[in-house]
Image: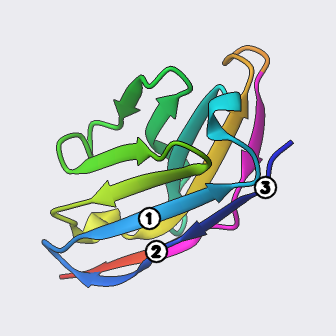
Amino acid sequence: QVQLVESGGGLVQAGGSLRLSCAASRSIFSINRMGWYRQAPGKQRDLVAAITSGGTTNYADSVNGRFTISRDAKNTVYLQMNSLKPEDTAVYYCNARFGTAIDARYYWGQGTQVTVSS
């Protein structure tokens, strides 16, 4: 089990940058995969970026080249978001996945709002 606390959301103009942080209540290296998801009003929650305990990263096509997921040596995962677009506006959720995609257990943070103005 793990608790996740996000921070760093806010309002930014198109073309600007934000960095989100996710602090976990245990070492992130004990978690199979850490990820960032986002959910816009009326839409489903989608994976934005993820990093495995081994350091492998993957990104949604819509953010590839603009967003970067990283981590520190202990319990925090970051999402650096550059060249933000209005369509990036959403609530961003930190996620921890234990196990594989077949038998996964997921834990979620409370979410942080990101609003990009045109």
Q: Which residues are magenta?
A: 104-113
Does the CB distance between marks 2 and 1 fall below 8 Å? yes
Rendering coords of residue 40 (x, y %): 48, 65
**Which comes before the other along the chain, label 3 or label 2?**
3
Q: Secondary structure at mark 2?
A: loop
**Which comes before the other along the chain, label 2 or label 1?**
2
Verify whether residue 116 appears in magenta: no
Rendering coords of residue 57 (x, y %): 39, 29
Q: Secondary structure at mark 1?
A: strand
Residue picked out by circle 2? 8
Rendered residue at 28%/60% (across/down): 81
Tell whether 1 sits left or right of 116.
right
What label sits on residue 3 in the rendered view? 3
**Quarter of the image holding residue 80?**
bottom left
**Quarter of the image holding residue 48?**
top left
What label sits on residue 20 in the rendered view? 1
Mark 2 neighbour density, 10 Å: few (under 14) some (14–19) many (20 or more): some
Mark 1 neighbour density, 10 Å: few (under 14) some (14–19) many (20 or more): many
Does the CB distance between marks 1 and 3 fall below 8 Å? no
**Marks 2 and 1, how far apart at CA:** 4 Å
Rendered residue at 26%/44% (across/down): 62
Q: Secondary structure at mark 3?
A: loop
Rendered residue at 69%/33% (across/down): 97
* Majority secondary structure in the magenta region: strand
**Marks 3 and 2, how far apart at CA:** 17 Å
